[in-house]
Each structure stands twice: as C-alpha cells, then as structure tokens.
Image (tube, grey):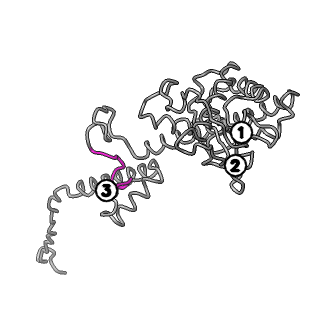
Amino acid sequence: MSDDSSRPIVIKRVKKVVGGHHGGAWKLAYADFVTAMMAFFLLMWLLGSTAKGDLEGIAEYFQNPLKVSMQGGSGSGDATSVIQGGGLDLARQNGQVRKGEDAAKNSVAKAKKEEARERERVMLKELKKRIEDVIDSNPAIKQFKNQLLLDITSEGLRIQIVDEQNRPMFDLAGDQLKPYTKEILREIGKVLNEVPNRLTLSGHTDAAQFASGSRGFSNWELSANRANSSRRELIAAGMDEHKVLRVVGMSSTVLFDRNDPLNPVNRRISIVVLNKDTEESFLQEAGPDVEVSQDALPASDTLTPAKAPPGRPGQ
C-alpha cells in the first residue's frame, strides 16, 4: 500500500476573465431604431393626408427639379408670390394667394356667369313667346304678322318690323308712322317694359337714293329719324325711356335682302332686347364705370326730325 501522504497534490487554477465595460453602445442603436420608426410613421401619415395633386408635384420635383422650380407647382409650393400678403395686391394681409384657390374661385365665378346666361336665354325665349301671343290675340295687328320678324341672336331678342310692297310702316320718304305701325309699337312697348333688359333701335332703308344725293338729306338722316320716331312711340306706350340704350340710323348699309337692294323688306325698324353681355359691351364704349344715360346718347339719337325732301318711290 502506498502512503496517501506521499501522493502529489495537483492544484487546478481556473483563470476567470472578467468582461470589460461595453460603454452603452446599445443605447445609440436603440435611439437610431426609434428615430427611424418615428420617421417611418411620420412618412406614412404624410402620404395618407397629402392630396393626389401634391403627390404628383412632389414626384415631378424629384424627376425634374429644375422644371418645377422654374414653373412652380405643388412640388415647390404653389403660392403665386413670396411677398408678404401674397399676390400682386400688396395691401392684402391674409397670407399668400394660392393658384389652386384662384382657379377654384374663377371656376365658381364662371359657373355662376354661365348659369345667369342660361336663365337670361330662357327669359328672352319667354319674352319672344309673349310678344307672339300678343300679336295673335290682337286682331288689329295680327294681319301684320308677316311683317313682324322675331328671332334670338347673339345680342339678344331681335324684333324687326319690315315693309311690304303695299303696306309700308312709314309715309313715303318720311318718318311719320302709319296708324297700324303705332299700334304695333305700343303693344310691343307694353311687353318690353315687363323685363329689365335694355334695348337698342336701328332704322334701315332700301338703296333708293334721294334726288339731292349724299350731300343733302339722305338715307342716313331718314333711317335715324325713323328709329327715333319708333323710340318715341314705345315711350308713349308707357315703356321706361331709360331702357333705350342706343338709337341709330343704318341707312342701306345692312340690307335684309342683299340680292335685291330695292326690296321693300329692306325698309325696317330693328329693336334688339339686349342680353347682359352685349349691354356691358355697349357700356364699356363709354369708359370704365360710366353709366350711359339718355343725355349721353349719340347725336343721331336726339336728332330733331328733319324735313325730308321729295324722295324716290319705295323709300
């Protein structure tokens, strides 16, 4: 037996290495992760709340930034001006005016104007029907129905009273209305007073000339006098005198029958009940913000009827 005391004693030493301090790098990584998540959710929110037009503008900016920067648009901000107050009006205090807002306002204004035009067209058609009913219901003027021409034009409702071979509206080469012409104008005047629209009157003759020629009394004076005589008859019927916007004599410059300048139908009085657009265009001739009054009418409107010399038959 061996003596246990003589055995060698083996001592095993385990070297433990204590890990070094990592310095908290995980905190930076976690902060980056949280920041990225916040940016992601913010991007999702922006995409969900941005209009389609703005998204297209942003996409266009990244595809062609120079074009968007030069031309404007949603990609570079759609304000028309960077000046405080916005737009060309420096007195404005409500911030920049956006192109989209201006376009929307213009679209609404255009729609309202078109709606007003449609209502006016309907009103003029009803007025035309009303005058036709008056003609049909009055035996005294129904026999002259073929000499009353009504139609809707770009200017408004046109009412033409034309001559026939054996049934003229005026005395030969004069501006005195025939009794039946007075009756027609008075009936028409009563109806025209029912609408707010203003009107114009124009006198027309055929191409037959006076013996004195163009240097003396001519078709110009005759047509203007006849138009003015018609105006006075309309007013005598009770029509408001301020409804008349213009009275002109056209001589034979606008023939009804161009193929036959001496056709009696060329001798006529034309009354146009103006639509709003045409009325505004007439008023613009007087200058901006100027209301045309009866006193401001052209000289031909207030002509004192001149005494016509003997004329050729048919005038």
Image position of 277 (left or right of 261): left
Q: Amino acid at mark 3?
A: Phe
Residue matched to label 3: 33
Residue 6's place in the image compared with 309, above or below, is below
Image position of 116 (left or right of 67): right
Residue at the image point whose x is 48% and y is 42% from the top: 106
Residue 61 coordinates in the image, percent (x, y): 35, 61
- Which segment is the magenta one? 72-82
Residue 145 coordinates in the image, percent (x, y): 83, 37
Residue at the image point whose x is 69% and y is 49% from the top: 256
Which quadrant of the figure contains the C terminus?
Answer: top right
Q: In which quadrant of the rendered view does residue 33 lie?
A: bottom left
Secondary structure at badge 1 equals strand
Q: Residues within 10 Å of mark 2 (few under 14, many from 20)?
A: some
Which quadrant of the figure contains the N terminus?
Answer: bottom left
**Whole-number angstrom distance, CA of label 2 to CA of label 1:** 10 Å
Q: Nearer the viewer, mark 2 or mark 1?
A: 2
Q: Which mark is residue 239?
A: none
Q: Amino acid at mark 2?
A: Phe
In front: 134, or 109? 134
Residue matched to label 2: 256
Residue matched to label 1: 160
Q: Residue furthest right?
A: 139
Whichever of callouts 2 and 1 sits on the residue coming sooner in the sequence is 1
